[in-house]
Image (tube, rainbow, N blue to C red):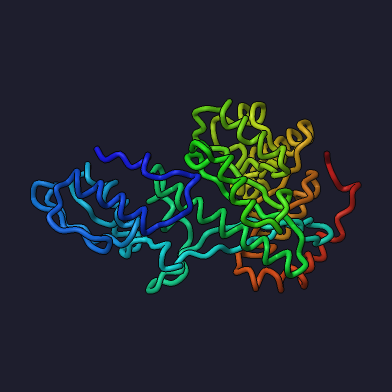
Amino acid sequence: MIRIDRLWLCSAPVDMRAGAERLLACVVQVTGAAHAHHGYLFANARATRMKLLVHDGFGVWCAARRLNAGRFVWPRDTPTAPLSLTQAQFVLFLQPKVVMQTGQVVGAEALARWQHPERGLLPPGAFLPLLDGTALEIVFGQWVVEAALAQLERLQEAGLHMPVSINISARHLQHPGFGAWIVQCLARYPGVAPSRVELEITESAALYDLAAVADTLAGLRALGLSVALDDFGTGYSSLTYLRRLPMDTLKIDQSFVQGMLDDTGDRAIVQGVIGLARSFGYQVIAEGVETIEQGQMLQQLGCAHGQGYCIARPMPIDTFIDWARRWQPPVQWQHQHAEDYSI
């Protein structure tokens, strides 16, 4: 079995090509490949009789990941071209978070997209599952953090002083030295205040050492960063995470938001999450707000903040800057009164 988890250090600069060479050398050593370089690798018959086409780090990772399966093929329902950070094919879009009644833009979430040269703009579902559970998940996460900090600088230069939330995978969060690496990243962007950075952790993430994660998050919050628990209510550890992890915000999962108008159970869950957030002193935001009626219901239940397609889709930073200066909420949201709130 190829061990690739120790080849990457969070504290080291992200150098995809050098990392690819190290990982490729590991693959060649284990498989006995006859010919290999950073662009292509052809495995001989003894090495599971496969022909590999790999490009830089991501392609090499796919080779390593599938060695034990005895063959290497890209799934038919996923893009056939291997992923590449080195060709700058990945971009970060921003999706706004707003106060639904007033229209105030209070933040944004950084969301990765793959600008594929042939297939166009691809969503995370086209590439994130291929990274899940691998060493390159950390490499990709490092790029996301660095890119988000650079976008925060751009927002501040444009006069938009708001936090940006960054999705952090469980593997990345639990990688040794994660907290110190975040501090190093912030040092490279001295114009970005730590209070502008929010780390989003998915509630369904497998956190095998809660005590260590809690210590890491507590240390980062002490520096001014904030923490949000995403997709709250969809996993099995909601209350455990709520009780043991230091955080600032709960995000109501979009599945409950989209079902609450017709399903009393979803509506009860939304109301319960809002109540929990209030009890713990956390902010609460609803994601997946797609209709005016959903926004009205959320306000009635006591949730003031929203994110979703009814407000805006994820967009490039230049478009976001222009949008944030112009956007106005639907009239129905502006006319929502406090006395209409049920809790």
Residue 328 vertical position relative to residue 277 in the rendered view, above or below: below
Q: How many marks?
A: 0
Residue pictured at 71% horizontal, 35% vertical:
272
Residue pictured at 30% horizontal, 62% vertical:
55
Left/right placement of residue 328 relative to residue 273 reads right
Foreground of the two, 312 or 90: 90
Quadrant the C terminus occupies: top right
Residue pictured at 69% horizontal, 56% vertical:
190
- Asked which quadrant contains residue 290, the reply is bottom right
Foreground of the two, 85 or 311: 85
Quadrant the N terminus occupies: top left
Residue 131 vertical position relative to residue 322 in the rendered view, above or below: above
**Residue 200, image x, y percentages:** 61, 45
Left/right placement of residue 96 relative to residue 85 reads right
Residue 233 vertical position relative to residue 60 in the rendered view, above or below: above
Residue 158 vertical position relative to residue 231 in the rendered view, above or below: below
Residue pictured at 58% horizontal, 41% vertical:
180
**Residue 76, image x, y percentages:** 29, 59
Foreground of the two, 342 or 129: 129
